[in-house]
Amino acid sequence: MSADLLLILPVLIPLAAATLCTIVWGSTRLQAAVTIAAAAALLVVSALLVVRVADGTILVTRFGDWAAPFAIAFAADRLGAAMVLVTGLLGLAVAVYALADVRRIAALSGFYPLYNGLLAGVAGAFLTADLFNLYVWFEVMLIASFGLLVLNKTREQLDGGLKYLALNMLGTLFFLAAIALLYNAAGTLNLADLAMTLQGTSGTAAATAAAWLLLLAFLMKAAAFPLFAWLPASYHTGSIAVAAIFAGLLTKVGVYAIIRIYTLVLPLEGTALQTVLLVVAALTMVTGVFGAAVQWDVRRILSFHIVSQIGYMLLGLALFTPYAIAAAVFYVVHHIIVKANLFLVAGVIGRVGGTYDIRRSGGLMMLSPLLAVLFLIPALSLGGIPPLSGFWAKLMVIDAGLEDEAWIVTAAALAVGLLTLFSMGKIWAYAFWRSPADGRSRPVGWKRMVPIAALAAVTLAIGFSAEPLVAFSLQAGQQLIDPADYIAALTPPIEDTVAENVR
């Protein structure tokens, strides 16, 4: 398959699926079938994309064959391709889970077109090589995610959705202001061209202001301290399928944007931004885990843990060594799978026990031993218990912190890992271990259990065979901290472009 197709299909497939779902609006079965088929196709294409870039190749396609900086370009390096792959994996798992979780009325109100639109926005954000188009894909995600969040139009959903929309719109304004400043200063928004143009000018007022505004915008999108209030206020209001895809992907697009921009366009090393990001990472870990510790609704516990875990990823970037950035890449991939799976399990806890409040739940260990095992796998992985994927992710981040002699923030990372285990233990003790609260239980079908088991299997596979992903992450970290190949691939010499056009 050509590079052009490999780069375009991850966006084109969900967009085509969204269109088809709109055409067959009256049939929820057809919409579900189209969505599952499209998600499976996205997974296959994204796997091929990873295979093509695994040796360090940077794939680039320029729409209309215009040279940089005029062309709209898509590009994939190791990080971008890996993010598209986990998007495909999660897209398929949640689409199957949605068969049982999404009510017919929600499906008829546009769940499937919005779901596919969200996947297209996420894939576009991971593949675009242009700052303005990154903004456009963020907006596609925002529109689709807001629609998914308020699909059932309950008062709680509308309240959570408005908070989600308002704070994300504020982030969008910061993003737009930064784009305007950078375009005024450099005359281009192509990421590679920006990187070359801004070399040696990072200290100018416009570049400095843009760097701060972009960091503010992306930290808001990533739900980092102190800008995370929108997340625990909204994620628990949607259906479990919606919460799972949000938990896995949305905040990670913000983290991805921070990694991409501050390794390529506005290098972080030695700037005040690096110090600020280090402090933000520590506070994000600590406040998130304390927020989770005082919650009783399993969805809100997991929502606060998204915040907490974002801190580990930011810490990897803030340390800004190839190894630390590799640790961040590993952490992002692991966390997308584990966190989404925990939300899927939370949906089953709510269905079996009839409540998401773990104080009124209980007895799930006896009612469904399989569910208990499938909860323990992502829960212990999130807490960093060996040899699960979270152990390797935390080990790499903490090791990078020790290497960099960042003692305080590394100690915070260790402590937060222990507190994460406390929260997971609380869910286990109340929902699974103790006696049933009132004896209520409802059956759980394969549509819910198969995706949970599949994601748990991926977590086990990463944990027991971590070496390939560790090696891939180390190579991705090196590629990110030395972006010369990425820049060269996106900005070929003029004569080469002319020769291509002549051919």
Image (tube, grey):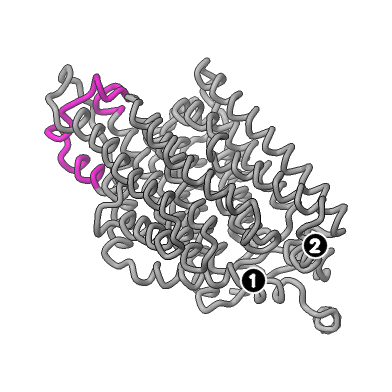
Query: Which secondary structure, mark 2?
Result: loop
Percent across and percent down for residue 463 are 29, 61
The image's mark for residue 201 is 2
Query: Mark 1: few, some, or many residues within 10 Å (few <14, many ≥20)?
Result: some
Q: Nearer the viewer, mark 1 or mark 2?
A: 2
In the picture, which quadrant includes the C terminus? bottom right
Instruction: From this view, report whether residue 61 is shown above or below residue 345.
Output: below
Residue ID at (82%, 71%): 67
Against 198, is 170 above or below? above
Is residue 131 left or right of 413 when viewed as pictured?
Answer: right
Residue 211 as seen in the image, left or right of residue 50: right
| Residue at 52% across, 45% down | 279
Type of residue at label 1? Pro
Q: Secondary structure at mark 1?
A: loop
Marker count (numbered): 2
Indicate the quadrant containing the N terminus: top left, top right, bottom left or bottom right. bottom right
Magenta range: 350-376
Query: Circle 1 sits on which residue?
Result: 483
Q: Is residue 92 in view?
A: no
